[in-house]
Amino acid sequence: MGQPIAHFEIIGTDPARLRGYYGELFGWRFGIGDAASEHVSASGQYGFVDGESTGGINGGVGGGPGYGSRILVYVAVPDVGEALRRAEELGGVRRFGPIVRDGFAVGQFTDPEGNVVGVAGAR
């Protein structure tokens, strides 16, 4: 079995509006806080969605002025730095990471076609 999708993000310029929209549309409940990095969302604008309200995968809705609209998935990996190194070796481009916060690491890369993918794990 391959590495599972561990987290999703929906990012836009008006995160409060997006949270209201997806909350009404899908019944998602949010806990507001900070994303692992300001590369992801403005401080205090990230709404964490737990898997209980989505039916499976944890996620977040955030962003703010200056953040481009996108939907992003994070793949669970045992070593974020190694996953980013391997992505580059295969023709991808590292965007950032690993960034470690409270023992949890994240990073992002673009694949050879320019799609942004996240990786997340314990280091």
Image (cartoon, rainbow, N blue to C red):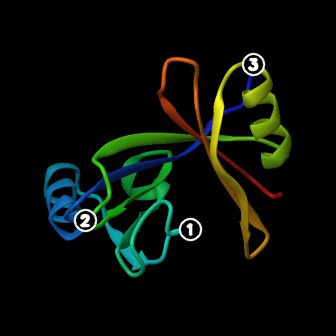
Report the residue marked by disc 1: 37
**Residue type at numbered disc 2:** Pro
Q: Earlier in the sequence, mark 3 or mark 1?
A: 1
Considering the numbered disc 1 on the image, is that residue within a helix, a strand or a loop? loop
Report the residue marked by disc 3: 90
Q: Is residue 33 above or below residue 76?
A: below
How many residues crowd mark 2 within 10 Å: few (<14), some (14–19), many (20+)? many
Q: Disc 2 and disc 3: Cα gap in Å?
A: 34 Å
Q: Disc 2 and disc 1: Cα gap in Å?
A: 16 Å
Q: Position of residue 119 (x, y in %)?
A: 66, 44
Q: Is residue 120 above or below residue 45?
A: above
Q: Position of residue 25 (x, y in %)?
A: 15, 50
How many residues crowd mark 3 within 10 Å: few (<14), some (14–19), many (20+)? few
Identify the disc placed on residue 15: 2
Between 78 and 27, the residue placed more toward the observer is 78
Between 114 and 82, the residue placed more toward the observer is 114
Left or right? Give the position of 43 relative to 88.
Answer: left
Considering the numbered disc 3 on the image, is that residue within a helix, a strand or a loop? loop
Residue appearing at x 25%, y 65% in the figure: 15
Q: Earlier in the sequence, mark 2 or mark 1?
A: 2
Left or right? Give the position of 111 relative to 50.
Answer: right
Residue appearing at x 23%, y 57% in the figure: 27
Identify the disc placed on residue 21: none
